[in-house]
Amino acid sequence: MAESPLGIWSVPLAMLAGAIRVSTPFIFVSVGECLTERSGRINLGLEGTLVMGAMSAYGVALGTEWPWLGVLVAAGVGLLLGALHAGICQLPRVNDIATGIGLMLFATGLAFFLGKPFIQPKAPNLGAIELGWWSSIPQVRQALQVNWLFVLGIALAFALAWALRNTRWGLIVRLAGENIDAALAMGVSVGRVRLIATSIGGAFAGIGGAFLSLYYPGSWNEGLSSGQGLMAVALVIFARWDPVRCLWASLLFGAAGALSPALQSIGVTQGYYLFSAAPYVLTLALMVATCSPERSLRGAPGELGAVK
Amino acid sequence: MTLIGAAHIPPHEGAPTLELLGFSKRFGTLAALDDVSVKVGAGAFHALLGENGAGKSTLVKCAMGYYAADQGQILLNGREVEITHPRQAHELGLGMVYQHFTLVPNMTVLENFVLSREKMPAVVDWASERQLLHDYFSTTPFAVPLDTPVADLAAGQKQKAEILRQLYLKRNLLILDEPTSVLTPDEADEVLSTLKKLTEAKQLTIVTITHKFREVNAFCDTVTVLRRGKLIGTRPTRELDNEIMAEMMIGRRENRVVVEREAHALGEPVLRIAGLSVADQVGQLAVEDLSLEIRAGEIVGVAGVSGNGQRELVETLAGQRHAEAGRILVHGEPYAATRAQMMRHKIACLPEEPLRNACVPEMSVAENMALRSFDQPPASPDGVRLERRPMREVARRLIETYRVKTPGPDAPIRALSGGNVQRAVLARELSSEGDLLIVANPCFGLDFAAVAEIRARIVQARNRGAAVLLVSEDLDEILQLSDRIVVMFDGKLALQTDAAHPDVGAIGRAMAGH
């Protein structure tokens, strides 16, 4: 441990850095899914949307040298995939969970197919904001490198929480998610509300994907997401459908994901893969702890098929 | 007119008259309504009586624009109006209050009220909305807490909130669909007498669908009776008594089965519950430290307003929910609601909503009737294979004995009407001659004939020596059937009394928590 001036403190520091860096895709996907689920629909396809977003953002950044244009395109691709999911779900006798899994496989496969030429070349990355300028310790400076998308994700979480509580639009989204009959009786078009909510949720997930390929890890390959989109969906349940709690939960998952590299950096190399599984184990443990066949989850939108 | 301010000072147009002329509506081959005309006077408190399937709900849903009638004309204040969508009805001042609540449970009262307004600002200023609604509630006959999520309100308060919302939206003709079915008698009286005052002041016209003669006699001035989609008559309440109303509703009296309860000595205790605690769906204790004993040959009636732990109690006894604490003994042995124990102790269970709680809707009537016995001879000679023929024969016999109306034993049970699903499940459960019968709201939503028959079957089971636990929200049912009455309030037993000389006032007060 002589190589690090921080000693054992480098583990929590690395986990903080990880929480900031790894959590960003979680924040975008879970906040987006939170919006979708509050409107009464579940979109399991966000894993696919995340991968498609990552691929298209990388491709655009590579072609135009403008990484931020890549982010925008990724959001657009996510929007279209969300709209596709919503459109299919509006057909009679369609199950949103099955559709979501189908779209997840479709979008992942499509991304791998279209993304083959982007695996080798290096695209320009999104820049970072240096928040560690006050410190002379390189680890601290590195840990406090924050990307604009992280800031945007935090802002989105708070903005969505505010909008769901204080705007007409937010109340109507919640109404569509809580009680279809009441929504119809008030003349709300439930299908349209869900179309919009699912599309926006998809756009958020697309941005999350752009972060993966353009900032951290910052390249395009097929193992880029490794299930983060799915974990983010589980995280929404853990966060009880509250966008701000989605944010905290994302940070927790990010920290868990950074555990393994952090331990490695101080020389604990045994069980690297075991510690890499920390976020997955955490997901499973949270689900087991919070779900029960005899209890419905408090805060669950009334019309959400998966929790009825 | 500003969006927020002016909406709260209703320029009262007063109670309207409503005429429904020549309404007909067919669903497939069934004539749900056949040339029905009703005239409701301004400021009337008009009752719509009839058995299930008589067409009451169809009629009002046509008037509200939920269904398109095949024929029919609506006159409001003498002028013909066209209502093809609920929104048009709302704009004309027609509002409906349902038996089941329509307020969104996960939202607060305030959010629900603001949301239901025609025009809502893009960004809601909660402080001023709260103040406005608070001021509005000071002008209404009753009020409800503004910042409580609707899910946490008691049933009576929920119904008050539903009615307040209609008044808040300036509806001056209210259609109430069994508005008091989830209220205690006291709560019902409070709500209805307030509405009565509003009708007497000619601010409101009310049409109410009800089954309760007591409420008709106490509050309604006119009664319209429907039977099988046809109009039987409209008469002032003062010309009617319960006998005449019942006759108008049913038309035939010979079908009423009355079973005499045999006087006999009670047997051994069959069910013994000691210190039982059960958690509800959100993890709070719904049943708390409850102890109860039921002996062979008695019906113990559990009265109470819904939501006081009755559902969780029944689910625990039926094996759908586990207990947090306490012991359940059947015939002196610990009981954990396993299939083997149910078989050994001959436990029969008729839960509420049997299609959901005791049936597999997509399976056939015969298969559903075999759910208790499919792994035993004759349905299964060795516990592995299934024999269809004996299963179907048993079902045919039960269908005949219990007069289940079904196209045949192979029809999916989902296709049966509510009363017939109830009969089918009762047939299955009673055919084993059980020692312990657990029944929850067995007659909810059934018509007179079916009610009488099912109640008779329950008394028969008691007469042959079964211990019966009867959980019901219908106090009349409890009073009619029970040997002993207990009242459940807030997860605990609030009162135990002998049913031979019941103090109905004390029972009502215990149901309301006094």
Image: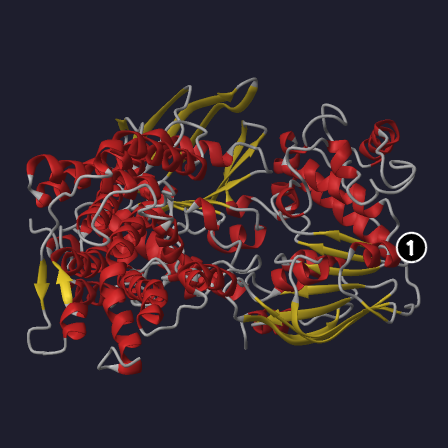
Q: Is residue B193 visible?
A: no
Q: Is residue A273 left or right of residue B338?
A: left
Q: Along the line of sight, which residue is nearer the eye, B115 or B393?
A: B393
Percent from the top left, x then y, of residue A220? 24, 43
From the viewer's perspective, tell me whether residue B511 is left or right of residue B397: left
Q: Can you tell which quarter of the image residue A280 is in?
A: bottom left
SS category of the residue bearing label 1: loop
Chain name for mark 1: B
Task: Judge by depth and name the residue closer to the eye, B200 or B433.
Answer: B433
- In front of the other: B273 or B179: B273
Q: Nearer the viewer, residue B360 or A254?
A: A254
The x, y position of residue B490, in whole percent, is 56, 72
Confirm whether residue B35 shows in the render: yes
Q: Quadrant of residue B413?
A: top right
A138 versus B243 height, above or below: below
Q: Position of residue A48 (x, y in %)?
A: 33, 39
Residue at the spot x=6%, y=49% of the render?
B1
Vertical relation: A276 (above or below) B288: above
Q: Which residue is mark 1?
A: B464
Residue B347 x, y percent position in the rendering? 82, 56
User: Who's the residue at 27% across and 66% down the image?
Assistant: A19
